[in-house]
Image (cartoon, rainbow, N blue to C red):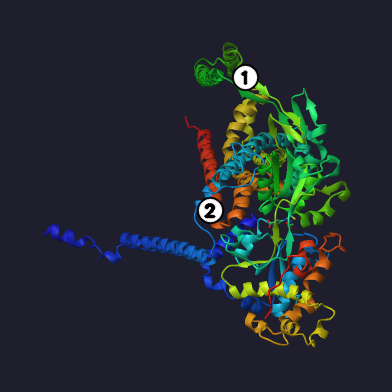
């Protein structure tokens, strides 16, 4: 009896169409189904429309011969290669200019950000003027400014500026000798790898020793010694298996050597100087967010100002700096697509420009291009999140 | 970014709009009261805005003629300045009704891009411009040169073919906008500036010292330039095609802006037909009988447009040459308007 009472007191299980769990599931499936149906409708309608207009579709064009040349390529490329290969040429050029831009923007941004907080009046004012000016001029104008400014002031190839008969500077680029690797060079490469491994272990050992005994070790100097020393020894053993290919003026232009084209220099310069202004402000606010008591406590312990900045203030500031820094890196990468204005053959110029125009396949080309930028952005974010977690407060 | 938004909206249009919107360009034009015409971003003689934003040029005259034929008023045109790279997407997506922008007729564009060329309003070929100080006399001496040009053009493909066929090295510096090509060439980035020869004649005046430069004798390609429409609207295709023929036909018959009213009273049956006094050509195109009269009256015949914009008395100083009428030793041949 008692059992029966308790049973009937428990709320009766509602019918399935009234169960909140099932109801929620039902509506979620309904929405999902709707989205899929809409997507399918859009895709089939698009294909219909393309077919009716007689516009080619599909990804077969990636195997078609490109037929155009590209100014700069990190991989082998000629007109006889395919649109697919041209895509990779553009992609690597984008990664290159974004990488260089991020590197210099970070260094320059940190320096200017710290300078703006400097107690030296002149230095602080100069940093302020730099930030306020460059931040407020449209990036495209700055790119043109550097590009045409650089071009107009450089000599023609025949009147190149020259250093030691091996470096040449003219309005076609900066030419330098290119190393040519011969048999036996592998030994040097392996020595280099070994040097890096040794340095990693040494740094770990030094860190542990300092934690235990307080003794410091000059890791930096030792590392420099190892990274130069080991490969040098290997080079001597292998009998210097390397020669140089020097640039040479033949006809209109230099051939041979390595060339850095003015388009790359001015684009990277404009991107890093512009983004550095934003990074400087982020760094400044990050440092200001660290309570002044931290600095004073550090000074009270007799720690020098430079070490205080490096070991006390910056590690704490980084926690505030990294998230907005990530979005500046993403901005820089996206802004690198302004390249087409000055003929730097990035992904957008080569693929979204020339290939799109030659094939007319806007939908395919743009979805690939957008997927690439999305992937780059996600990778940068993932890396920065990992770094941010590493930097996060370790509670002891 | 702004440009990708444009292209994205084009894609969105392809996805959402049902294809009925493709047809009926004439009804569209009549309803909105103007022709949307895709032109260049500024190429003197072909399509170029003056200080007041008034467009002139041989390509612009074609747009105006289409407006005269369809709406009876040559001034009812709105212009979309397009870079070489943007132009086809703009036409495919319906952003413009007709593309009249020194565009070369090629097989790929006529088929895979979903477009139709309505004819040729200027027969051209690609050439090279160099500094006189370079001391080059012909194109075969250009091995190793840096070459500046526009991207998204036949130009960059022809130059690749030419240098490869002649086993010459070269570096191609390709910009999106024509003004940057000229500025970079002028600043010494390139030894050679290459594009259609008419383009060289027009862009030359944008150089700091036009007289320091010369055009080499070689013509390395065929560049038949003409107006383009989308696949899928035959009536509109016919209208643009016959607008061009009407300009040529009236020149052939000696009808011009000055005498067109008098010519209406002519006894010549051919003149009567083209001016709509007799026959059904206008009706068959879906237009008023006086469609071609409006073109000649308001825009002029082909020869007048040529002389006014690119001919020997203009800064471009282009001799009529192959662009003469067929009975004058040229390639311009209007089909019979009957
Ligand atoms: N006819 C060639 C080239 C057309 C082209 O874009 N030419 C350039 C150089 S003359 C131009 O029109 N520039 C003017 C502009 O972009 O506004 C083609 O159709 O691909």
* Residue that mark 2 sits on: A367
Residue under the image location 75 percent in, 77 percent down = B295
Q: Residues within 10 Å of mark 2 (few under 14, many from 20)?
A: few
Q: Chain of mark 2?
A: A
Residue A158 or residue A305, whichever sits in front: A158
Image quarter of residue A306: top right
Question: In the rendered structure, which disc, 2 or 1, sits on the residue that comes first in sequence?
Answer: 1
- Mark 2 and mark 1: Cα distance apart in space: 44 Å
Residue furthest top as drawn: A237
Q: Nearer the viewer, mark 2 or mark 1?
A: 1
Q: Which mark is residue A266?
A: none
Is residue A262 positioned above or below B44 on the image? above
The answer as to whether the residues below labels 2 and 1 share one chain is yes
Q: For the image shown, how many numbered marks are present on the structure?
A: 2
Picture coordinates of residue A3 (x, y %)?
14, 57
Residue under the image location 77 percent in, 40 percent down = B141
**Do callouts 2 and 1 mark residues in contact (Cβ within 8 Å)?**
no
Q: Viewed as shown, does residue B4 lie left or right of A142?
A: left
Callout 1: CB less than 8 Å from ligand 1: no
Q: Quadrant of ligand 1?
A: bottom right
Picture coordinates of residue A72 (x, y %)?
65, 39
- Look at the image and tell me whether residue B82 can be seen: no
| Residue at disc 1, secondary structure | strand
Residue under the image location 67 percent in, 82 percent down = B282
* Residue that mark 1 sits on: A242
Q: Residues within 10 Å of mark 1 (few under 14, many from 20)?
A: some
Is residue B209 positioned above or below A207 on the image? below
């Amino acid at each position: 009896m008692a059992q029966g009472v308790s049973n009937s007191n428990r709320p009766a299980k509602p019918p399935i169409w009234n169960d909140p769990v099932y109801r929620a599931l039902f509506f979620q499936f309904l929405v999902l189904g709707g989205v899929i149906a809409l997507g399918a409708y859009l895709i089939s309608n698009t294909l219909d429309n393309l077919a009716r207009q007689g516009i080619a579709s599909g990804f077969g064009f990636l195997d078609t011969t490109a037929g155009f040349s590209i100014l700069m390529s990190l991989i082998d490329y000629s007109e006889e290669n395919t649109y697919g290969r041209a895509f990779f040429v553009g992609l690597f050029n984008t990664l290159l200019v974004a990488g260089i831009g991020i590197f210099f923007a970070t260094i320059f941004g940190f320096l200017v950000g710290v300078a703006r907080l400097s107690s030296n009046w002149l230095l602080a004012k100069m940093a302020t003027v730099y930030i306020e000016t460059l931040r407020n001029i449209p990036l495209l104008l700055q790119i043109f400014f550097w590009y045409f400014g650089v071009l107009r002031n450089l000599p023609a190839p025949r009147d190149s500026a020259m250093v030691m008969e091996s470096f040449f500077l003219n309005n076609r680029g900066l030419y330098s000798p290119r190393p040519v690797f011969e048999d036996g060079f592998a030994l040097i490469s392996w020595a280099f790898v070994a040097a890096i491994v040794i340095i990693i272990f040494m740094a770990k050992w030094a860190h542990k020793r300092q934690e235990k005994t307080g003794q410091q070790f000059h890791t930096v100097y030792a590392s420099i010694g190892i990274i130069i020393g080991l490969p040098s020894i290997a080079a001597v053993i292998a009998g210097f298996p390397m020669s140089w290919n020097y640039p040479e003026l033949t006809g209109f232009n230099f051939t041979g050597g390595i060339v850095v084209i003015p388009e790359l220099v001015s684009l990277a310069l404009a991107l890093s100087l512009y983004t550095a202004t934003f990074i400087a402000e982020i760094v400044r606010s990050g440092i200001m967010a660290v309570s002044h008591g931290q600095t004073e406590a550090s000074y009270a312990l007799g720690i020098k100002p430079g070490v205080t900045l490096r070991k006390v203030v910056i590690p704490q500031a980084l926690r505030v700096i990294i998230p907005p820094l990530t979005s500046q890196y993403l901005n820089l990468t996206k802004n690198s697509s302004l390249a087409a204005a000055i003929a730097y053959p990035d992904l957008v110029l080569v693929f979204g420009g020339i290939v799109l125009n030659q094939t007319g396949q806007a939908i395919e080309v743009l979805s690939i291009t957008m997927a690439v930028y999305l992937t780059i952005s996600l990778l940068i974010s993932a890396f920065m999140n990992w770094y941010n977690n590493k930097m996060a407060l370790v509670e002891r | 970014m702004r440009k990708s938004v444009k292209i994205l909206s084009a894609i969105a249009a392809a996805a959402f709009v049902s294809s009925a919107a493709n047809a009926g360009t004439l009804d569209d034009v009549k309803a909105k009261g103007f022709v949307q015409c895709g032109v260049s971003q500024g190429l003197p003689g072909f399509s170029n805005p003056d200080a007041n934003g008034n467009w002139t040029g041989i390509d612009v005259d074609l747009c105006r003629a289409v407006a005269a034929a369809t709406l009876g008023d040559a001034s009812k045109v709105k212009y979309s300045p397009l870079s070489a790279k943007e132009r086809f997407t703009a036409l495919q997506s319906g952003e413009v009704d007709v593309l009249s922008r020194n565009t070369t007729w090629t097989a790929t564009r006529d088929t895979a891009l979903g477009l139709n060329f309505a004819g040729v309003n200027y027969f051209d070929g690609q050439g090279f411009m160099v500094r006189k100080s370079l001391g080059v006399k012909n194109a075969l001496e250009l091995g190793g040169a840096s070459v500046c040009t526009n991207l998204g053009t036949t130009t960059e493909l022809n130059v690749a073919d030419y240098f490869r066929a002649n086993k010459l090295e070269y570096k191609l510096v390709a910009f999106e906008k024509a003004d940057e090509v000229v500025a970079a060439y002028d600043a010494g980035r390139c030894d050679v500036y290459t594009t259609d020869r008419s383009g060289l004649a027009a862009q030359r005046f944008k150089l700091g010292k036009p007289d320091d430069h010369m055009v080499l004798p070689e013509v390395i390609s065929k560049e038949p330039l003409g107006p383009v429409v989308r696949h899928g609207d035959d009536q509109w295709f016919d209208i643009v095609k016959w607008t061009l023929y009407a300009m040529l036909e009236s020149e052939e018959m000696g009808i011009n802006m000055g005498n067109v009213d008098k010519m209406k009273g002519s006894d010549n049956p051919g003149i009567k037909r083209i001016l709509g006094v007799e026959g059904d050509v206008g009706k068959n195109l879906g237009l008023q009988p006086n469609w071609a009269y409006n073109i000649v009256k308001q825009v002029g015949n082909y020869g007048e447009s040529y002389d006014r914009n690119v001919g020997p008395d203009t800064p471009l100083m282009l001799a009529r040459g192959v662009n003469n009428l067929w009975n004058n030793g040229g390639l311009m041949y209007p089909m019979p308007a009957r």
